[in-house]
Amino acid sequence: MSSATTNGVALRDPARRREAFAGFWLITPALVVMVSMLALPMVALVVLSFWTQDGFTLDTTFTLDNYRRLFATSERGVAWMGMTFYLEYPVPAILMIKSLVMSLTATVAVVLMAYPMAYFLAFRVKRNKAVWIILLTIPFWTSYLLRVFSWKVVLGFNGAINSGLISLGIIDKPLEFLLYNPAAVMITLSHAWVTFVVLPIYVSLEKIDRSMLEAAADLGDSRWRRFRRITLPLSMPGTIAAALMVFIPTVGDYVTPQLVGGTGGTMIGSLVQQLFTKQNDAPMGAAVSLVMMLVIALLVLLFLTLVGYWKMRARRQG
Amino acid sequence: MRPLTIYAALFMAFIYGPVLLLVVFSLNDNTFATFPLKGFTLRHYVEMWSQAPMLAALGNSLRIGLGVTLLTTAIAIPAALALTRFRFPGKPAILGAMMLPLVIPSIVLAVSLLVIILKFLNIPLSLWTVAAGHVLICLPFCTSVLMSRMEGFDPSLEEASRDLGSPPWQTFRRVTLPLAMPGVISSLLLGFIISFDEFVIAFFLTGTDNTLPVYLYSQLRFPNRLPATLALGSLILVGSTLLVVIAEILRRRGVQSNNPGDL
């Protein structure tokens, strides 16, 4: 509100108005791309989710049927992993919960793996820091498809681990439990996203004022206490941001469950793809993807609110 | 050695191990990707080039990557300029919206584009629709690379040019653009790599023509073609690694220096 008023006042000044006009003019091509290829397609997805598909014909009368079907309850429950779903069409709900759990597990694993590496980079590496950073950047830019596929080569029935163990004489027939299950998906997701997280955590560790750590050491704080009271809290914002950058896109990941998940490791992204192709029910696919985004957004908001609340409480307690 | 150093070494082994295995098996004289290794060969690399669909897919990916990165960088340069040099209302909101494609799952971007293209505009799918989708996902990367470079050099150089009476276009062409050049080149390289390696959007938005990742994905289902697929994959990995290293060196040098002559 206040910024809008200051802008309003400032825009009465001709020089500021000319500057704002030039700025808008320069950013217009980018805005055209964002509106035509992000905003309008999202609107189209929302509109489609209120239509229905009947065989090969698309019925364009407005209806809430797709959403009703996603949330319709049923007398008969379907049991999955010790939970019972009293839903007419339980598949999306089950896959949604499964995807959230798998993605959350991978995110936690990624942060736990990346933090010590970022700490090493920020506090221990003195020479050739740029080389380390470039080495950590390369996997992030190189083909996601190939990095995921490499785990199929590692974990597969005829893969590196099985054939290696057999040729060493440790086992005599391939272990089948390595590939095509949720664990394989979570390992692969962690591997594919971990370097994405090291750099943001590293940046937040690097920004910490070293004199604070020295002061704490001079006042007799132990190394662990210095980490817990200074380093960890100050690196928290970067760590949380990085964790969200992994959690949000991995919930809807499609490549990983497809290549290493098998039937047991399918996720919500696989369902969206099937609804749009094999099952030929694009409107339902649209509804599922929108509900998925909504659930992710709500969870992220809830998490950020909790973080804000913890911070406030910590500050009040001094 | 200290425990943290050992951890860092293990971490790097975890990151690079599986990918290096692809390269090792592509050079192994065997039709399966299995241990024990039988001997060194380059025959998989030779066989690979005799596959016409692979060459066609490679050509498509190179063309799309080149076109996408040129167009995206051309859009991102003025956008980065606006976001770093000009004050205008709604700037934080626009910046936030531009970074959205980074966090939206790519399958959602892909199906939303698919819906508007097929159901609302009735445009047939082709390599053009793939390229359009790639412009969207490259834009946030190219813009942020360029912004970090433009924030990195002293705006007083541009002020001096304006004070000496240069019109805005001349200031841009003679001062801003040369200073931003390392960022422009790294934006061009990264945009190319993103488009060249992108799979999900290409998979949904392509018609009958394949891009290289879509072709590669279709080959992963045939175990007897695995070595040739591994050879192709290894070449892609080596190629993108080279481009990333060049882009990173340019970008890091660019961020630190004020001198356009250091290129």
Image: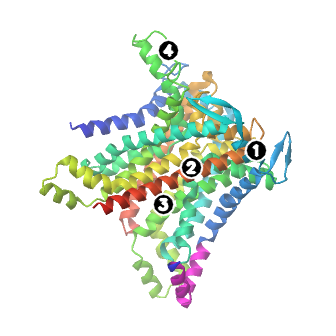
Question: What residue does disc 3 label?
Answer: B145
**Residue B8 forms part of the magenta stretch:** no
Residue type pointed to by label 3: Val
Q: CA distance from mark 1 to mark 4?
A: 40 Å
Q: Return the x and y of residue B217 as percentages of the image width and height.
A: 63, 34
Q: Nearer the viewer, residue A244 or A160?
A: A244
The subunit letter for the residue under badge 3 reads B
Question: What residue does disc 2 label?
Answer: A296
Mark 4 vs mark 3: give the one in front: 4
Classify A313 as above or below B166. Answer: above
Q: CA distance from mark 4 to mark 2?
A: 38 Å
Classify B195 as above or below B82. Answer: above
Mark 1 is surrounded, within 10 Å at the Cα level, by few (under 14), some (14 to 19) or many (20 or more) other residues, namely many
Residue type pointed to by label 2: Ile
Question: Which residue is pictured at 75% across the width and 41% down the height?
Answer: B208
Q: Return the x and y of residue B120 as percentages of the image width and height.
A: 80, 55
